[in-house]
Image (cartoon, helix red, strand yellow):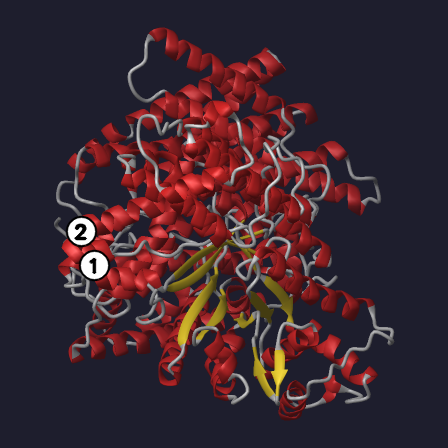
Amino acid sequence: MATTKQTRRSAPRPSPAASTTGATTPTAAPANAAARNTRNTEKDAPLREDIRLLGRLLGEVVREQEGDAVFEVVETIRQTAVRFRRESDAKAGAELDKLLKKLTRDQTNSVVRAFSYFSHLANIAEDQHHNRRRRAHLLAGSVAQPGSVAYALSRLDDAGRSGAQVRALLGNALISPVLTAHPTEVQRKSILDAEREIARLVAERDGPHTPRELRHNTELLRARIATLWQTRMLRYTKLSVADEIENALSYYRITFLRELPALYEDIEGEIDSQFPARGKQRASQAELPPYLQMGSWIGGDRDGNPNVNASTMQHALKRQSTTIFDHYLEEVHALGAELSISTLMVDASAELLQLADASPDHSDHRADEPYRRALIGIYARLAATARSLGVVNILRQEVGAATAYATPEECLTELDVLVASLRAHHGSALVKPRLAGLRRAVEIFGFHLATLDMRQSSDVHEQVLAELFAKAEVEADYGALDEEAKVALLLAELARPRLLHSPYVDYSEQTVSELAILRCAREIRRRYGHRAIRNYIISHTETVSDLLEVLLLQKETGLLQVEGKRLRDLELMVIPLFETIPDLRCAADIMRQWLTLPQVAPLIEGHGKLQEVMLGYSDSNKDGGFLTSNWELYKAENQLVELFNEAGVTLRLFHGRGGTVGRGGGPSYQAILAQPAGTVNGQIRLTEQGEIIASKFSNPEIGRRNLELLVAATLEASLMPQDTDGKQARKLAEFERVMEDLSERAYRGYRNLVYETPGFTDYFFAATPIAEIAQLNIGSRPASRKSTRRIEDLRAIPWGFSWGQCRLLLPGWYGFGSAVSSWLAEAGNARENAKRLATLRAMCREWPFFAALLSNMDMVLSKTDLAVASRYAGLVADRKLRTAIFGRIVDEHERTAAMLSAVTGNKDRLAANPMLARSIKNRFAYLDPLNHLQVELIKRHRANITAGREPEERVQRGIHLTINGVAAGLRNTG
């Protein structure tokens, strides 16, 4: 296979072509742009057909459900909006404004729903087109594409890596997407379920069909769209943690339970194909352990969520366990029907016959069918295990009683008996269709399904221990101690076998709850296995005492043992989360103190000499802006790598990424490849949040592709050779010096606007729908950590979500333009200016980190719209404040767009991703009416509140419908 060599991920690379992130340079512009556009148009023809079909069917449903008058209003608005966008027709813009202002309240909500659902349907069509293009590429037998494991293995092979090295890496790897319940998914599960069925029907239209089959498909599509129209789009009650758990579990049933095991099998095949093993080497190759595993925060993340407690943790594991046992039981039942093999036809192994004889099934009708009898026994044992773990309502009653499995490994052993017998008796072909997938699923998911992380703020830990110390008469005011005194006290207490807690003393509700949660974690590990809960994340980690406090709390609850003043058997890894800019700058120093503590060293040794560190993208962005956040994360990672290498400890980074670029979002593949050298090494966890979970995993084919991207990127980032050439190292050092300068400039500009400009908070709360978003029932957590209007106390999620709704997406770009322009202006003369610009262009071409940063910013800028944003600015009553702040934002936007074009050489946004560019451009016509109506509805709603009138339920519903529609149109807005 032909591949492009890349010798270092974070160091400069010499290729002048477009980077894998999509950021391009003038030298990358194609000479035959017209021909390329023609080819793209031809390739996109099926997409346009699907969008036209779905749009036509939606129009028919609107006419049928709402009447001709509403249909004509919607269609007139649509045509006018399209004309305004595509032809830049000022007259059309005035017409659109007039049309929207004339709408009655009933018409307003119908128009909002129509345009919102069109965005939803366009998303479905685009996802299907991505799948279609991928299949076409595979069918054509083309060279493997970036992002596929085949491509990664080919690059590694060309770079001189061996199959043994690939297997060794994956044999010790952990790649883990972690689902969180952060509230940016505005869609109801009922809507998502209906849209999945529409997606299935759209996919079904590909391929040869008779006219009758196509008519039937179209009728079903119309029916499903009608169902969608008649389904309530909004939640009328706030989501509970239990609701969030169920929403997440639906993606396991849709994608993970089947696609993950299948992906493992395919990757094994790709490795064997790229690195063929021979003779004894092939015979000695063991199956790879489960290196790609799922994680979850839902039910275990207590930080700022008072609704999460010991009960929600228990409920989460019970529901997770129910989900996986339902799958196992269904698969075993299906295997029983399929493996009708008779010993009258073919022999079976002695082990298999023994397993069959142990089954509770003694029917004479199956006396010669040992596989069926063995599977009936496995089913009975699984059912008994499920009941012992609290699973109820098992669909099919087992034939008879059986002993529950003590561990998933016991179940694996019995499945292996079936596999070995089949392979030894001409039945190898019967293993792959279902049995291999079931066996792999048990390896991956165990009895727990996904690892549930625990998370709490360091402030809470301090308060709990302060009370324990005070009531045990050890220290009257722990919170008042300085850091050195805290560390000394904590280490002394850790060395003592006695506990601070007494069952005969009354404690505050918070302390009782926190200790109960940790005891619950201990019980969950005993019941579901050690993989069920193994991580404890500390939000707002600022000192080493924050880490020691969690060790002491684990000791208090039996999760850490003391033996002769020596600590041992730490059950939950203590993981610091560094979130703000100051925290990131202190991360390496804090971890140095942690790693060098004699009491901690054996605990790290007990976890395989591995320590995880979590980095927060959201709060660091809200704290310091897009450019500085990315740069401080990069620097912190480099410093941690150096520190951990010195200490001889393996570093695993956990990336707390959100949906928007401002919260660390963007393509995962490019993000992993852009990580500094040495930061991956087969170990990476990253969060998947809100609407990103739906966009990545609600379609099995797309979900599988996204999981494969993580593995492919991890392989490349971990095993591609690093260039140690001195010239490259000097160039990287120069790039980093420039980036440090740019970051400092961007930081000052961002902080000056957001935290130092008088009235900015008032502007933000008036010019965005932040208050209205807080009323949406999209999550169990409150929008702010405290009941204030301070930006510092606002959660990063609604902060970013609000800027997306008003079409500014400010957290994803603000500060870049002024930083670059001021740095260039300092050159002093034209020659030096040109030299500096050349340096920035070289950074874009040759440094994956900078290229990824620019590519993500390019995507954000393509979704901004100053004209729409100006309407939201009009919501600010103080004209002077409005003019001052919006004027600054507009100026910085213009500078940023100009500087990005100067660096990349591309005047147009998304020049390197024409399909996405066309998609966004086409969506604007359908987003304009939604944004316009949102502003008008917010005006009415706030006027009612100001006048002391009761809010109108219809107006509030309209606002929330527009929020839903805009989020669907922009896709990654949370």
Mark 2 element type: helix
Q: What residue would you read off at disc 1?
A: 163
Give residue 274's mark.
2
Whole-percent x, y for residue 177 in the image: 46, 54
Q: Is residue 716 left or right of residue 961?
A: left
Judging depth in this view, the residue of 370 and 390 nearest the camera is: 370
Q: Nearer the viewer, residue 184 or 395?
A: 395
User: Mark 2 is on which residue type?
Assistant: Gln
Does residue 447 sit above or below 167 in this rendering?
A: above
Identify whether 197 is placed above or below 37: above
Find numbered disc 1 in the image and state the secondary structure of the residue it sits on.
Answer: helix
Above or below: residue 888 compared with residue 954:
below
Image-quadrant location for residue 21:
bottom left
Residue located 56% across and 36% down the image: 360
Residue 886: x and y in percent read 54, 56
Residues at circles 1 and 2 in contact by the CB criterion of under 8 Å: yes
Task: Give the CA separation, mark 1 to mark 2.
Answer: 8 Å
Q: Is residue 259 at all visible to an observer of this figure?
A: no
Which residue is at the front of the view, 894 or 190?
190
Q: Residue at x 66, y 34 (%)?
A: 958
Kindly identify which numbered label has been placed on residue 112. Answer: none
Viewer-closest of 175 and 462: 175
